[in-house]
Image (cartoon, rainbow, N blue to C red):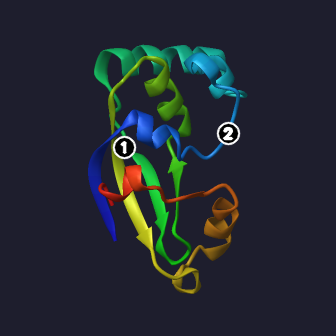
């Protein structure tokens, strides 16, 4: 099941896939490895227009974990330009054995965070 919502950037930030040094919302360090010209273009676009393509937040209900699985660069830029909210497609998985792409999801679970009370009301 997939639902689309708008969630606060500050809450999504806690569930980003990669923990990088992002003190002070330093976009460059948050987007390590992303081409700087692409980053500048993305930052400019998000500053002017907001996020057009929703992030993907994956919820693993059977293990009570959640993770931003698509859109981590957009999330870093949104945080860096102080965008208050981000559009999100939230996908829910109950049981990993039923997934067609089980290997992909299992690799993501390693980075998933426990679901905290701040995000429960959005799910």
Frontmost residue, 31 versus 40: 31
Rendering coords of residue 76 (x, y %): 53, 29
Residue 11 placement: quadrant: top left
Pointer 1: what residue? 54
Q: Which quarter of the figure is the N terminus placed in? A: bottom left
Whether residue 26 can be seen here: no
Is residue 114 rendered to the left or right of residue 34?
left
Residue 31 placement: quadrant: top right
Rendering coords of residue 16 (x, y %): 56, 43
* Comparing labels 1 and 2, the label whose residue is closer to the camera: 2
Mark 2 burial class by Cα count in 10 Å: few <14, some 14-19, many 20+: few
Frontmost residue, 38 versus 47: 47
**Which residue is at a point 70% across and 27% down the rendered structure image?**
21
- Residue furthest to the bottom in view is 97
Rendering coords of residue 6 (x, y %): 28, 43
Location of residue 95 with respect to 51 vertically, above or below: below
Location of residue 112 with respect to 81 vertically, above or below: below
Secondary structure state at the residue bearing disc 1: loop
Location of residue 65 with respect to 11 vertically, above or below: below
Location of residue 109 with respect to 101 vertically, above or below: above
Frontmost residue, 28 versus 35: 28
Q: Check contact, mark 1 vs mark 2: CB within 8 A.
A: no
Q: Which quarter of the figure is the C terminus placed in? A: bottom left
**Which residue is at a point 57% across and 80% down the rendered structure image?**
96
**Which residue is at a point 35% across and 47% down the rendered structure image?**
88
In the drawing, what numbered circle is on residue 82?
none
In the drawing, what numbered circle is on residue 19?
2
Whether residue 85 can be seen here: yes
Secondary structure state at the residue bearing disc 2: loop
Is residue 76 rendered to the left or right of residue 5?
right
Is residue 78 rendered to the left or right of residue 96?
left
């Amino acid at each position: 099941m997939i639902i689309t919502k708008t969630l606060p950037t500050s809450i999504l930030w806690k569930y980003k896939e990669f923990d990088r040094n992002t003190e002070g919302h330093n976009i460059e360090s948050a987007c390590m490895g992303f081409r700087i010209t692409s980053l500048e273009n993305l930052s400019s676009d998000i500053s002017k227009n907001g996020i057009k393509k929703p992030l993907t937040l994956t919820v693993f209900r059977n293990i009570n974990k959640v993770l931003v699985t698509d859109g981590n660069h957009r999330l870093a830029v949104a945080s860096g330009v102080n965008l208050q909210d981000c559009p999100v497609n939230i996908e829910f998985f109950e049981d990993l054995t039923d997934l067609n792409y089980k290997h992909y999801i299992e690799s993501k679970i390693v980075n998933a965070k426990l679901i905290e009370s701040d995000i429960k009301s959005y799910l």
